[in-house]
Image (cartoon, rainbow, N blue to C red):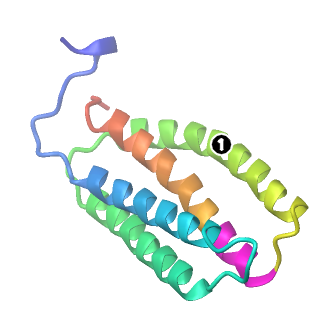
Amino acid sequence: MAALGAERRDYPAPRCTELTLATIALIVAGGINMASHIPHRVPLAPAWGLLAAAALCYAASWAVLARAEGFAWRRFWTVFRWALLAYAVSAGMIEYVFIYDGVRGATLGVLSGMLALFALDVPFSIAYTVARCAAD
């Protein structure tokens, strides 16, 4: 039984969920790695590597989705925009806390990159989940 008149599509859904979950896992691992060194000097090489790997997973999820035929793009973009607005506000508040707490330099850059990628990845995941089962 479909909710709100939406019908399940008969095409195979692209495998974006695994890529978005990998992106989140890499971001969380990078944040945990950085937090485990505080209040001492944080080695940034592992964090940069995890951030780069997360960015590659995120880009791959867009590439996989772009090749999907019959995907409900209009529904995807509607959900993505609203979810992005919510996560941008949350990310902005967290970024303010980073700056207020005195995080500076490259450490702030890595944390900001992870936060921005998180704020993009979660709305993508939400919008994909809604649109993959929607009739456009």
| x and y percentages locating residue 68 in the rendered image | 22, 54
In the image, 20 versus 47, the foreground residue is 47
In the image, 104 versus 131, the foreground residue is 104
| x and y percentages locating residue 131 in the rendered image | 34, 37
Q: Is residue 109 above or below residue 89?
A: below
Magenta range is: 105-113
| x and y percentages locating residue 40 in the rendered image | 73, 79
Q: Amino acid at mark 1?
A: Leu
For label 1, the crowd category at 10 Å Cα-Cα, with few meaning under 14, some 14 to 19 and many 20 or more, is some
In the image, 44 versus 40, the foreground residue is 40
Question: Is 94 a magenta residue?
Answer: no
User: What predominant SS class does the magenta segment belong to?
Assistant: helix
Q: Say whether residue 17 is left or right of residue 116.
A: left
Q: Which quadrant holds the N terminus?
A: top left
Location of residue 34 by image quarter = bottom right
Question: Is 112 a magenta residue?
Answer: yes
Q: Secondary structure at mark 1?
A: helix
Q: Residue at x 37, y 56 (%)?
A: 20
Label 1, on which residue?
85
Location of residue 9 by image quarter = top left
In the image, 54 versus 135, the foreground residue is 54
Q: Is residue 112 above or below residue 65?
A: below
| x and y percentages locating residue 97 in the rendered image | 82, 55
Q: Residue at x 21, y 52 (%)?
A: 14
Location of residue 22 by image quarter = bottom left
